[in-house]
Image: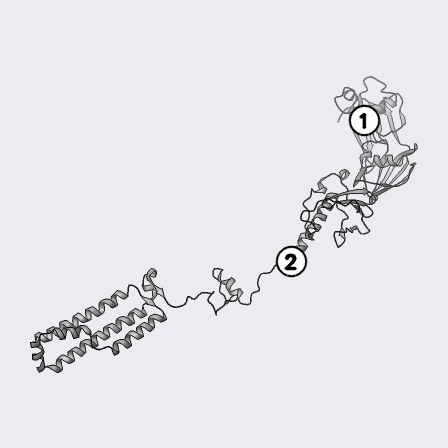
Amino acid sequence: MKKVLSAAFISLAVCTLTVSPARSQTGNVRVGPLADDKAASTKSDEKKSPPNEASRAERKSAPAGAAKNSGSEPSSRREQARKGDAKDRETSTALTSTAATVTPTETNPSSVTSDAPSRTSDAPGVPLPVSARGASKEPGGSPDDMKGAPAPTTNASTNSTNTATRTPSMPVAASQPLTSVYRVGAGDVLDIRLLNHADPRQSTLYTVMAGGVLEYPAIADPVTVAGMTTEELAAQLVAELRHRAVYDKPQVRVSVRDYASHTVLVSGLVSDPGPKTLQREAVPLYVVVAWAQPKAEAGRAVVVSHASGKSATVDLNDATAMNMLVQQSDVVTLVTRPPEFFYTGGEINSPGQKDFHAGMTLTQAVLASGGAARPDSIRIKVSRQGADGRLVSTEYNLREIEEGKIPDPALQPGDRVEVGRYTRK
């Protein structure tokens, strides 16, 4: 009985010694192809190895008397020893297979090592397409979704067109008065100076051709300049030179040497008829009349607008009306002034038809008619014919006008002036 217990104790001790190293290996698991090969080699070594060395040592160290007494039961002891070795091998095999099948997620990542090659997109022999690499950087994207997608390209022609046609950042000429703006047109001679390359032998004068285009040597294609101010044209040339990489920072100055595109035709009672050249988009009428030198008998100017086709008659003695603006292609004709009259009546010393002059006021008309007949005749009624042919009457107090309490009203040709004791209605 003691022999059986001794053999069982020895087998248990051997199993404990075998399990302890296997358990200690689980703390530092090796995974991958090398780990599988090691597990396979461990199995083959155990099959070929003789019975456990520890069991052999125990049997050798056993007392001689025990060995003699064991002769009665040799088969049972050998059978038990074989069973113990079989259990040891099964336990070792199970632990080895468990260690080989442990996944990295079940262990501490800091202690896991792998003999397998890393699976990255830069691994040799497995190159990724360009589209797939670009797609893998986008969150939620996959290489399959990006297959066949064209690589981003830059349209050089579109960029160059946008650069050439970009509107220059210049002051808005439309916000300036027409009397201080000039827009170049066909026939104008421009002085264009490229400050980056000042060559005294090269001419700086260029004429705007028919159609409003300009041929500049540094620019291959003609540039449309009609309707531009000199500042806008300079900015356009700078943009074209920068686009063609002629200069990194081109500096261009543009001015008008000879004005030819804006003219006004003057005729009639003038000493110098003919076209008059404008140096602005518009000039006052009195300037054009002065250029033409009106004759003494000229009294009116008839202006026909080229833009609207309408005509307007202006008295040469009317300073306010002479400030009207004349623009390109307008026609100005100076004519005699036809006789105009106004009519007075009532309590006045010299009633009747009187000659009218531009700018005449009510008090002037009363004085031209001899003045009021009575000192208390202070009520004056002025009747004026409207567009519909009806008369519209307005009453004034002559004393208030003379004292400066109310303005002295201006008269118009054909007005009727009646002096008397009239009351306001």
The way the protein has been coloured in the rendering is: one colour
Callout 1 amino acid: Lys
Query: How far apart are the alpha carbons under marks 1 and 2?
Result: 79 Å
Image location (x, y in percent) of residue 281: 78, 41
Q: Quadrant of residue 255?
A: top right
Determine whether 225 is above or below 272 in the image: below
168, 121: nearer the viewer = 121
Q: Residue at x 90, y 26 (%)?
A: 352
Determine whether 318 is above or below 214 in the image: above
Image location (x, y in percent) of residue 109: 34, 61
**Residue 307 in sight:** no
Query: What residue sits right under mark 1 in the picture?
Result: 381
Image location (x, y in percent) of residue 73: 10, 81
Q: Quadrant of residue 30?
A: bottom left
251, 397: nearer the viewer = 251
Q: Residue at x 20, y 68 (%)?
A: 17
Image location (x, y in percent) of residue 92: 24, 72
Circle number at residue 156: 2
Callout 2 amino acid: Ala
Crowding at dot 2, Cα within 10 Å, few <14 / some 14-19 / many 20+, comes out as few
Local SS, label 1: strand
Circle number at residue 302: none
Q: Which of labels 1 and 2 is toward the front?
A: 2
Q: Residue at x 25, y 68 (%)?
A: 22
